[in-house]
Image (spheres, coloured by chain):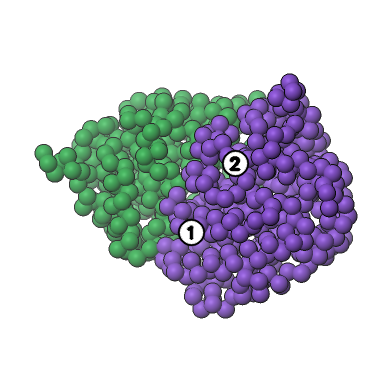
Chain colours: A purple, B green
Amino acid sequence: MKLENDLLIRTANGEEVERPPVWMMRQAGRILPQYRAIRSKLSGFKELATTPSLAAEVTIQPVDELDVDAAIIFSDILVIPEAMGLDYELVEKKGPLFPKTIQTMADVERLLEGEEAAANLPYVYESLDITKKELNGRVPLIGFAGAPWTILSYMVEGSGSKTFSKAKKLLYSQPAVAHRLLEKITTTTIAYLKTKVKHGANLIQVFDSWAGILTPEQYKTFALPYIKRIAESIEDVPVTVFAKGAWFVLEDLGKINCQTIGLDWNTNPELARELIGTDKVLQGNLDPCQLYAPTAEVEKATKAMLQNFGSKHIANLGHGVYPDTPLDSVKAFVNTVKAYRYESSLVS
Amino acid sequence: MKLENDLLIRTANGEEVERPPVWMMRQAGRILPQYRAIRSKLSGFKELATTPSLAAEVTIQPVDELDVDAAIIFSDILVIPEAMGLDYELVEKKGPLFPKTIQTMADVERLLEGEEAAANLPYVYESLDITKKELNGRVPLIGFAGAPWTILSYMVEGSGSKTFSKAKKLLYSQPAVAHRLLEKITTTTIAYLKTKVKHGANLIQVFDSWAGILTPEQYKTFALPYIKRIAESIEDVPVTVFAKGAWFVLEDLGKINCQTIGLDWNTNPELARELIGTDKVLQGNLDPCQLYAPTAEVEKATKAMLQNFGSKHIANLGHGVYPDTPLDSVKAFVNTVKAYRYESSLVS
């Protein structure tokens, strides 16, 4: 199906465009009253994520309400451990909790991987089918997965953590176990993302949420090679890699076979461009807390961000939008981007 | 009193030395069986921190057990809010909790500041007196405080947080309140640190633990100017600034009037030296999780770190040592540094 608004895809493919496309990480979520209305009737996040008709509905809500340039399928990065055989719960206000964790090679060997594991997520693929049908080509649909290191960190640590010291301990004390686990996560993620593309995902984003707690050397050993393999395996649609906090490997990320690199709000666009080079499209990076400011200041900060990035840019926040962000500020952000025009297209 | 081992002070003052001095953030703590023995008899951390004889005892334990080149006074950065009139509790396994938080200008106006506030911490100064007496000049004693932004973040957020979004919201939505609060924290911190120096602190370290969650622009507006004032106010002893995660302002930190800059494990020494210049001494930065590796690898990684830094270096971890770190690994780290010699002194 041809897309009515293909600005995101043209931008990710490096074409010259009239303005940057805009969407927000976590746009399908608590910032929207429509989302909160649905969520309040359910037992929890997982019921929403595993009910395809509802997941599709909340995926489309931000397109209706905010008129963003893309939808991102409502799901969770931790479906991958679950598909591999490691169940998790989502504890309200606490985050994910894995009753069992991975500690030994035997634990890793018991896990499913690749297509066999990815086949355990039919509800995600069905969510994509319904979303594609209901979006009817209005905007592209983004599919996503966690990067292998981030997925490992939850599987080993068992929950969120300030330091992820148990997960990092595995890298230092049992590197062979870590690599075997990363391998299995990678083959599962590749099969999963390829299936998402078959079911209509127009762009893939890989989230390395805990990239920033590794040393540069660890990142090059335990994270980058696996992301590289994932990026190389996705052939039909553009790929975005967002390694939060990993400023120290931006130069290396610039060399992998992806189209777009996401930036957090610590990283100024000029420096990122210098490290990454001119090939890639950059995505980001307004501080999500900037949206707590009065709307006039949100507009000013958004314009400044757009000017700092220049072309080859997908406008976004530097992290997921926080649940208590005022909707007016969110709209000020989105609308400022949508009203912006690159000078070259004004001239031509 | 003349110091028997003044290697840390000579290094911080830029003198040529035979090897880097070594100490560890959180060395007075749970890694030591002696510490756990004392702690188990008490109601909690605060009882230990507010009982000068005990605080002095645990301050000296790592000098006895590990033979490190410095002691750091056992205390907490959150004594400053308490001295200003904002009490906190330390909840086991959860961290600090402020029953009341700062939200408005009226809240800020009620707080004490400067010498009047600093006078509320006699037990800290008494801990220093006892420690100095019992150390009897063996090694220098380090005094410390939190940087104003980090202290503000706890006073506003009320607890630890992954995002500190409430604290950042204050910066964006009520910048005048934030600056007034930072001002009061700064005058209190200066009075507090000067008193610590009077009571024998031989070096001062300022910890900006939450530096890394600000944008570069916010850091330059709400954090750096206050750290600069503190560094300029401490005249008689060297000052170390450790802004964790704030790689993006290393160049600016290099320009303030301090002797040493602490680095976390994300920041490679070559890049730091390039950004900071050759004037400052650098401190850090082995990943604390590296100490989970077998001791032979700890030794190898420590040597590699020493070589990467070269001279003008104080050996430390890139963060506080984690409580479950094996004591053998800690000793391997310390002893590897102590056995190291700079080539120039081998030759001369």
Q: CA distance from mark 1 to mark 2?
A: 23 Å
Q: Residue at x 40, y 43 (%)?
A: B268
Looking at the image, residue A302 lies above or below residue A40: above
For residue A222, which numbered disc appears in the image? 1
> Horizontal and vertical percent for residue A149?
55, 59
Q: Quadrant of residue A186?
A: bottom right
> Horizontal and vertical percent for residue A113?
61, 72
Identify which amino acid the numbered label 2 is placed on. Answer: Lys
| Nearest the eye: B260 or B230 | B260
> Horizontal and vertical percent for residue A166?
50, 63
* Mark 2 residue element: loop
Tell me if residue B104 can be seen.
Answer: no
Which residue carries the number 2 mark? Answer: A280
Tell me if residue B270 can be seen.
Answer: yes
Q: Quadrant of residue B333?
A: bottom left
State if disc 2 and disc 1 touch (CB < 8 Å).
no
- Please give left or right for residue A23 compared with residue A310 in the image: right
Q: Residue at x 72, y 55 (%)?
A: A143
Identify which amino acid the numbered label 1 is placed on. Answer: Phe
| Nearest the eye: B98 or B246 | B246
- Please give left or right for residue B22 compared with residue B91 in the image: left
**Looking at the image, is mark 1 or mark 2 earlier in the sequence?**
1
Q: Residue at x 56, y 31 (%)?
A: A270
For mark 1, name the chain.
A
For residue A66, which numbered disc appears in the image? none
- Please give left or right for residue A93 compared with residue B264 in the image: right
Looking at the image, residue B224 lies above or below residue B25: above
